[in-house]
Image (cartoon, grey):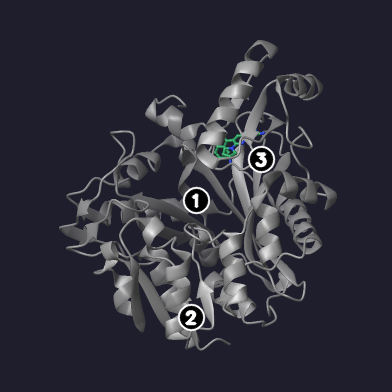
Amino acid sequence: MFSKILIANRGEIALRIIRACKELGIRTVAVYSEADVNSLHVRFADEAICIGAAQSSESYLNIPAIISAAEITDVEAIHPGYGFLAENAHFAEICQSCHIKFIGPSVDNMKLVGDKMAAKLAMKKAGMPIIPGSEAIVKDKDEALKIAKRIRYPVIIKAAAGGGGKGMRIVHNDIRLASAFYMAKAEAEAAFGIGDLYIEKYIEQPRHVEFQILADEYKHVVQLGERDCTVQRRYQKLIEESPSPAVDSKLRKKMGDTVIKAIKNIHYINAGTMEFLLDKHENFYFMEINARIQVEHPVTEMVTGIDLIKEQIRIASGEKLTLQQEKIEFNGHAIECRINAEDPENKFMPQPGRIDTYHAPGGKGVRVDSHVYVGYDVPPYYDSLIAKLITHGKSRQEAIFTMQRALDEFIVEPIKTTLSFHKRVFNDQAFIEGNINTGYVDKLLGEQES
Ligand code: MV4
């Protein structure tokens, strides 16, 4: 096991990783930007090093500064958390060449899953159902027309370098295809510097379901069930839960077995998530693999009792997974609400500023992962997540009841937060019944997609 690790992140996830390290007897090094001098991750780590100015590009994305901090403090490993450098294969490669263990998948894993087309083809070979579409980059509108003719409308054009819905276009007929193709290409070029596009059949009104996996260096793989992340706005998740109200035990077994087989096939290592679209007829389609610990990992922890961060660290240190698939128990239901410093009344505009009043809920079945406190200034430079409110109950209904009262207890003033949005969702019949799809938030708010 490692004796000292560096946490290349900030906010709640940096705290979450420090907590796991303390319980494992591992010393911690925090890195921080000039905007995060007064942050709790700086305070709770054994050592802390300032790595640059507030802007992410100068600090949390500054590879030379982070590697220098790691060398100065003589750590054996780096945990990247999520976001920032977590899925940067180049960073993982540099760690490797500096003999610092990157706590995450192998460099080859990261390169594969970072290339969406390559990942999709690898998954197809591994027996995973994929969405019908182009099997390579689509060169021009004529090729696009041919593919649309084969798979039929509606189709969706996606950026190969993609993410966050940028460069995505839904097309319903031949007439619209050419212009959509070149618009998507321009957008992808502007956003990623790479204009490569591919085309898929558009799955209408799906749910977003993802499976958590853990895999060690010895090809031992387990799946920890699914999370339903259907409640999203502009591709930003707002609520996640486990298990999914849309997955029954038969489908769970089928999806879980397929996931394990595919993860073994690509020799994936460490924690990962396989994302799916689930349609009305219980067809599931592979979307992508997230090669990192995810924001929503606590719902899986609450249901399985497994500490995912500790497992990541154990796997990275070369230990064998001691979990056995048949012995993993799935208990009850967990739901997470992302509390963001955003104004739901004003297109979820970020609301940086000072928190004067803060009260986090507690009691049975409540978990709060947060880095904020009274007097904390939410900086404008990073994502707006200020807390994750997670409730756990014997049933989905119990988790919902606990969430309703926990939301009422949660006080954050004077900045606007997504608490008001969540209160609305937890009183909405469609959500309570579990009868929703990815269009849910737009419909609830009466907003239109872009
Ligand atoms: C899709 C799709 C329907 N059909 N692909 C959105 C973000 C990007 N990662 C992929 N996305 C989608 N891809 C096909 N072939 C619908 C979406 C989608 C979506 C996916 C998951 C969660 C929320 C979503 C909201 C709108 C669209």
Q: Is residue 208 left or right of residue 35?
A: right
**Kind of residue indicated by mark 1:** Glu
**Kind of residue indicated by mark 3:** Leu
Find residue 97 and report its horizontal and vertical position in percent. Answer: 62, 75
Q: Which sits in the foreground, 197 or 164? A: 197
> Residue at left 68%, top 46%?
116
> Residue at left 39%, top 25%?
446
Find residue 123 and report its horizontal and vertical position in percent. Answer: 77, 50
Secondary structure at badge 2 equals strand
* Residue highlighted by disc 1: 240
Q: Against 91, is 449 above or below?
A: above
Q: Is residue 251 something one can see in this rendering?
A: yes
Q: Which sits in the foreground, 151 or 338? A: 151
* Residue highlighted by disc 2: 5
Q: Residues within 10 Å of mark 2 (few under 14, many from 20)?
A: many
Instruction: Give the CA separation, mark 1 to mark 3.
Output: 15 Å
